[in-house]
Amino acid sequence: MRLKGKRALLIGAATGIGRACARDFARHGASLVVADINETGLVETVALAQEQGASAHGLVCDVGQEASVREAVEQAESLLGGLDTLVFLAGYMRTGAVDQFAAQTWDAIFDVNARGTFFAAKHGAAALRRAGGGSITTTASLAGLRGAPGMTAYAAAKGAVIAFTTALAQELAPDGIRVNAVLPGWIDTPFNTPAIEYMGGALPHAEIVRRAVPLGRQGTPQEVSPIYVFLASDEAGYITAKAMMVDGGMAH
Ligand SMILES: NC(=O)c1ccc[n+]([C@@H]2O[C@H](COP(=O)([O-])OP(=O)(O)OC[C@H]3O[C@@H](n4cnc5c(N)ncnc54)[C@H](O)[C@@H]3O)[C@@H](O)[C@H]2O)c1
């Protein structure tokens, strides 16, 4: 019960890593609100959290729209009686050669990953201040440090998330708010379909993973969620402004 008494808003948690986080936050005693644009996935995630005995609510939210994020934060604060934990997991990826990449696709990638993180932090920080402190965890990617062919826009957006997180941690430290980023490596979710297609399909992708990842395989969402639990817990009380990689040893 590492999160007993914590009141958490998880944004972008209808599927994948976020869903695993919702289950783990619930198991560890947090009460939570899950916000996402995917209404069907949201219902399943909330049910999964409730099965762990937690109080859990779902809110439809589009992180590309500031008003929608502000509303989700306000509703979460009111449903939970305050907010001390914010986790941002929403992500969007498209791949393509830079000379053929549409500006509209570039913008869509920045809207969800970078602007979404900004909107969540902007409105979340105010709520966490009202609670007297807490923690914010963002989600970047190893791609935000190293990039990869076909991923220029996604890498740039996740690089922005890392820089934003580091700056925000320094800005909010005086308010007792810790801010960290999680950087997953290759995690097995349908999110990577555009990357796998760019690499020529499942077989070349598997070979790239085998060569690049010392542990020789992709991770699972359940192998990433524990770091989010730890960062949100009081055990991480002296950890802020960090980029925490969960990547099977890929960055070494
Ligand atoms: N899977 C990986 O290998 C990997 C690697 C590095 C980083 N990540 C990051 O981890 C996070 C979770 O990815 P995942 O693999 O679980 O994929 P996922 O597709 O299961 O999760 C992404 C979530 O973001 C939500 N989302 C997308 N656009 C949204 C919007 N406009 N408003 C609200 N919610 C929106 C989706 O509905 C989904 O629930 C993402 O930020 C992703 O960039 C994933």
Image (cartoon, grey):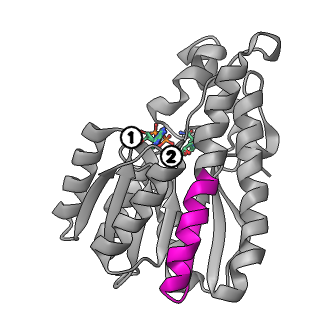
Magenta stretch: includes residue 131: yes
- Residue sitting at 57 percent across and 16 percent down? 203
- Residue 185 image-quadrant placement: top right
Tell me the number on the disc at residue 95: none
Q: In the rendered image of this protein, does residue 149 appear above or below residue 63? A: above
Where disc 1 sits, the SS reads loop
Could you tell me the amino acid type at mark 2? Val
- Residue 20 image-quadrant placement: bottom left
Residue under numbered circle 2: 63
Residue density around tag 1, few if under 14, some if 14–19, many if 20 or more, within 10 Å: some
Region rendered in magenta = 117-137
- The answer to whether mark 2 and mark 1 are in CB contact below 8 A is yes
- Residue sitting at 60 percent across and 63 percent down? 121
* Residue 215 appears in the picture as rendered: no
Q: Position of residue 63 (x, y in %)?
A: 50, 46
Image quadrant in which the N terminus is located: bottom left
Name the one closer to the observer, 6 or 248. 6
Residue under numbered circle 1: 37
Q: Position of residue 102 (x, y in %)?
A: 71, 16
Q: Residue reaching furthest front?
A: 67
Sequence-first tag of 2 and 1: 1
Name the one closer to the observer, 164 or 181. 164
Is the C-beta of the residue carrying label 2 under 8 Å from the nearest atom of ligand 1?
Answer: yes
Judge from the rendering whether residue 127 lies leftward or rightward of residue 141; answer left or right.
left
Magenta stretch: includes residue 45: no
Tell me the chief SS of the magenta region. Answer: helix
Could you tell me the amino acid type at mark 1? Ile
Name the one closer to the observer, 68 or 197. 68
